[in-house]
């Protein structure tokens, strides 16, 4: 409901290390999607655990190319 | 979210009522005037029901009008709301995300049975949600409730659908914990702090899993390196075995060729003649010949036996015997001397004196003569005996018969003998032939070739066996390599997953810090802002100034979600130290501040917000309600609430109407038909024949 959550996530993400190009943006989007999933879960039970794990795994995949470069 | 229109059908007295709402940006207020008991709260309940369903209704709450229910067995009621909301959609042209206004239509229906019991007997709600697509209402097939909850969560029903009296519980509940819980529930829902905490907790649980997985990383690495080593070992062995297999193939090929050559040589040589076989044949011939020789000897023995047989002798001697008899007769007749003469002669010899008296000594002629006479006599006597014997024998012989039997036997034996001799000749001829053949084969090396072939075959068999073993070994090793390769792949995957866990741990930690930081911002910045706005709104509504020394100084929402009011003399208990108007002001201040801070744009529907308020406070509450939110505002007001505020309403209301309960005693022009709620077109400060109410009615 809170219209400002996204902007607060954006604000909060600025304090996070940019692990790879675009990491902060992806992190914010992931956080936003997790919050939305949690909202859906509150309305009707969904497999939230899997969804959160998938979101994290998905972002980890994006991080992979850089770690491989290392 | 903007409400555009609502249609009530058979919802209590709202038999068929349609109300349009103001959708004007500049005048978003809709005022629905109605006296007490004219259906204002029913409309609010119906609006709540359409969005949140029967769960928000008490079991005693009956939707169907009792007049209708008594006439029929059951009544179907429905409420339909048309609304729109701005949503982010991906533009079909260019695929860009943009905010667009989407029109929706929601309709909830229910069938209620006639019942004499206190409790309502309702069927299951029917819910339909439609989206307007290119001018047509398209029903949403699935997830309607979920979609609806995403538009308006049920926890916020009391924030957006406010029953003026009930809403006071935010500040009016005696129990401070109860107040705090209500405020916290509304605030955490609107500000999403609970949601953010849950989201952070969810990521924390993912982090725990990732951490656990990471702990297994070393084991997985070890397992993987071992698997790789095993795979390499199997690969090396396979390479070696493949090399051996190639050699074995060459060897097998070679031995096969050698065997083929040996076999060909052998076959060619055998084609010439097999010395062994010839020798064996010779041996066989010789055995046959030897057998024939034995048979011949036996045949000869038979013949000899036959020749020695008495019958043969008899038959052969018959004639000579006869002749010998005749001769012997002659001899015996001539040589015989009379016994008396013979005795005399013998006496003479004994006396050595002749008849004449002369001596007959030895050597004398006379003596010799006498001795010769005696000998002749003895011979004749013997011949006579012999003759008698012969005669006796010859008399016994049936010469004719004897000779026939003997001849037959002799012929048979001779025939057999001849046959054996024939065979013997055959064997002899054959022997000579085979011996000649063998002589020719003396130089043949069939045996040697046979041995060579046998050796080659043995070699070939050995090499084939070795090749088969090597093939099996290669296959086994290939299988091992494949299995180990699979094993290492699986482990590699697991390892890469584990490696990914490291990244996931970093990400999870970042996510937790981001979500918790966002929540912290909400709890500090937003709650603080909420608290400030609450105080500001409250002071404005109650006409106080923070500088005013005698009155209320401020209101506050604490981080613990406690609404507190501070006066010059200290903290006031909102439940019993504030007036009714102040309580309403505080409640609306909280709601308006909450809606304002959260930025949620949904219509606020308020029923009788100004009860117990009067004068400047009432006007100020109304003014703040109108100006304090950018959302659409729908107010159900009584005539007394409107009184003294007409100017404010006229200034801000895009739509205003009056509702009339035709069954109420208060209505002047009370229609005779069954009680129902009607909507009047007259404004809030006017009245018509339909809505005019008795002046002494009270409201």
Image (cartoon, rainbow, N blue to C red):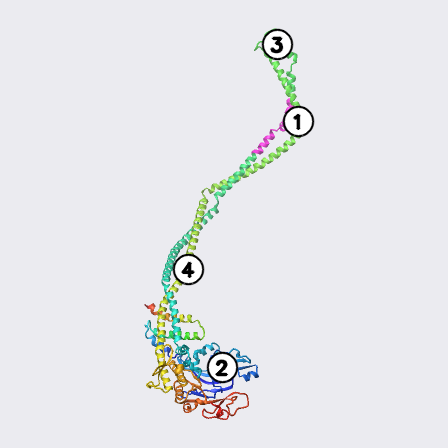
Considering depth in this image, is B588 or B84 the residue closer to the camera? Answer: B588
Q: Mark 1 vs mark 3: tell me if same chain.
A: yes
Which label's residue is closer to the chain start, 4 or 3? Answer: 3
Contact (Cβ within 8 Å) of mark 4 with mark 3: no
Which label's residue is closer to the chain start, 3 or 2? Answer: 2
Task: Give the chain of mark 3.
Answer: B
Considering depth in this image, is B343 or B77 the residue closer to the camera? Answer: B77
One can see residue B102 in this view: no
Q: Mark 4 vs mark 3: tell me if same chain.
A: yes
In this figure, which residue is indicated by the disc labeled 4?
B483
Considering depth in this image, is B501 or B681 the residue closer to the camera? Answer: B681
Question: Where residue B303 is drawn, which disc sits there?
Answer: none
In this figure, which residue is indicated by the disc labeled 3?
B348
Question: Where residue B107 is drawn, which disc sits there?
Answer: 2
Which label's residue is closer to the chain start, 4 or 2? Answer: 2
Q: Is residue B168 magenta?
A: no
Residue B305 position within the rendered picture, expressed as x and y whole percent measured from the top left: 59, 30
Describe the element under mark 1 as helix, strand or loop: loop
Which segment did they paint magenta?
Answer: B297-324
């Amino acid at each position: 409901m809170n219209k400002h959550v996204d902007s607060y996530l954006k604000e909060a993400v600025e304090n996070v290390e940019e692990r790879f190009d675009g990491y902060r943006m992806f992190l914010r989007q992931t956080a936003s999607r997790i919050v939305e999933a949690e909202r859906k879960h509150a309305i009707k039970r969904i497999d939230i655990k899997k969804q959160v794990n998938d979101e994290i795994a998905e972002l980890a995949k994006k991080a992979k190319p850089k770690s491989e470069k290392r | 979210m903007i409400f555009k229109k609502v249609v009530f059908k058979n919802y209590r007295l709202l038999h068929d009522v349609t109300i349009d709402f103001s959708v004007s940006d500049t005048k978003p207020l809709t005022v629905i005037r109605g006296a007490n008991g004219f259906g204002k709260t029913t409309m609010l309940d119906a609006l709540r029901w359409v969005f949140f369903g029967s769960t928000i209704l008490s079991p005693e709450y009956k939707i169907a009008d009792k007049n209708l229910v008594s006439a029929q067995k059951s009544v179907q009621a429905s409420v339909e709301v048309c609304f729109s909301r701005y949503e982010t959609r991906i533009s079909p042209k260019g695929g860009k995300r943009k905010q667009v206004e989407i029109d929706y239509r929601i309709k909830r229906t229910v069938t209620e049975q006639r019942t004499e019991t206190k409790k309502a007997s309702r069927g299951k709600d029917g819910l339909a949600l439609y989206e307007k697509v290119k001018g047509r209402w398209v029903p949403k097939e699935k997830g309607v409730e979920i979609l609806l909850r995403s538009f308006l969560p049920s926890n916020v029903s009391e924030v957006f659908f406010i029953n003026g009296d009930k809403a006071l519980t935010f500040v009016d509940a005696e129990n401070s914990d109860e107040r705090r819980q209500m405020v916290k529930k509304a605030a955490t829902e609107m500000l999403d702090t609970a949601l953010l905490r849950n989201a952070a907790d969810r990521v924390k649980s993912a982090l725990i899993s990732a951490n656990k997985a990471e702990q297994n990383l070393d084991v997985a690495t070890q397992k993987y390196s071992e698997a790789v080593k095993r795979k390499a070992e199997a690969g090396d062995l396979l390479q070696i075995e493949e090399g051996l297999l190639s050699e074995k193939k060459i060897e097998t090929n070679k031995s096969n060729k050698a065997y083929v050559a040996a076999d060909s040589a052998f076959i060619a040589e055998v084609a010439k003649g097999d010395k062994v076989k010839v020798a064996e044949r010779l041996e066989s011939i010789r055995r046959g010949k030897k057998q024939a020789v034995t048979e011949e000897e036996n045949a000869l023995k038979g013949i000899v036996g036959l020749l020695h047989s008495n019958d043969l002798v008899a038959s052969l001697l018959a004639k000579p015997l006869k002749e010998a008899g005749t001769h012997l007769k002659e001899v015996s007749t001539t040589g015989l001397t009379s016994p008396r003469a013979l005795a005399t002669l013998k006496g003479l010899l004994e006396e050595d004196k002749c008849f004449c008296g002369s001596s007959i000594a030895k050597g004398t002629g006379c003596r010799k003569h006498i001795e010769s006479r005696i000998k002749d006599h003895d011979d004749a006597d013997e011949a006579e005996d012999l003759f008698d014997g012969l005669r006796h024998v010859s008399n016994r012989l049936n010469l004719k018969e004897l000779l026939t039997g003997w001849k037959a036997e002799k012929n048979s034996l001779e025939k057999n003998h001849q046959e054996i001799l024939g065979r013997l000749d055959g064997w002899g001829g054959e022997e000579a032939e085979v011996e000649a053949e063998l002589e020719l084969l003396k130089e043949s090396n069939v045996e040697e070739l046979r041995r060579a072939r046998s050796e080659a075959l043995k070699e070939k068999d050995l090499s084939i066996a070795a090749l088969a073993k090597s093939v099996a070994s290669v296959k086994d090793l290939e299988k091992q390599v494949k299995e180990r390769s699979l094993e290492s792949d699986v482990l590699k995957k697991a390892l890469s997953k584990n490696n990914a866990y490291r990244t996931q741990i970093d990400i999870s930690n970042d996510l937790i810090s981001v979500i918790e930081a966002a929540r912290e911002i909400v709890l500090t910045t937003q709650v603080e802002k909420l608290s400030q706005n609450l105080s500001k709104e409250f002071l404005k509504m109650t006409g106080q100034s923070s500088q005013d020394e005698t009155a209320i100084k401020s209101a506050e929402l604490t981080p613990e979600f406690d609404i507190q009011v501070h006066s010059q003399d200290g903290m006031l208990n909102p439940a019993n130290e504030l007036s009714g108007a102040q309580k309403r002001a505080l409640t609306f201040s909280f709601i308006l501040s909450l809606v304002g801070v959260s930025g949620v744009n949904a219509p606020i529907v308020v029923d009788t917000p100004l009860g117990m308020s009067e004068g400047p406070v009432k006007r100020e509450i109304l003014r703040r309600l109108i100006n304090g939110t950018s959302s659409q505002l729908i107010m159900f007001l009584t005539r007394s609430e409107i009184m003294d505020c007409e100017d404010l309403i006229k200034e801000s209301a895009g739509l205003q109407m009056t509702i009339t309960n035709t069954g109420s005693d208060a209505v002047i022009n009370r229609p005779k038909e069954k009680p129902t709620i009607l909507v009047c077109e007259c404004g809030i400060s006017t009245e018509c024949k339909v809505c005019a109410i008795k002046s002494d009615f009270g409201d």
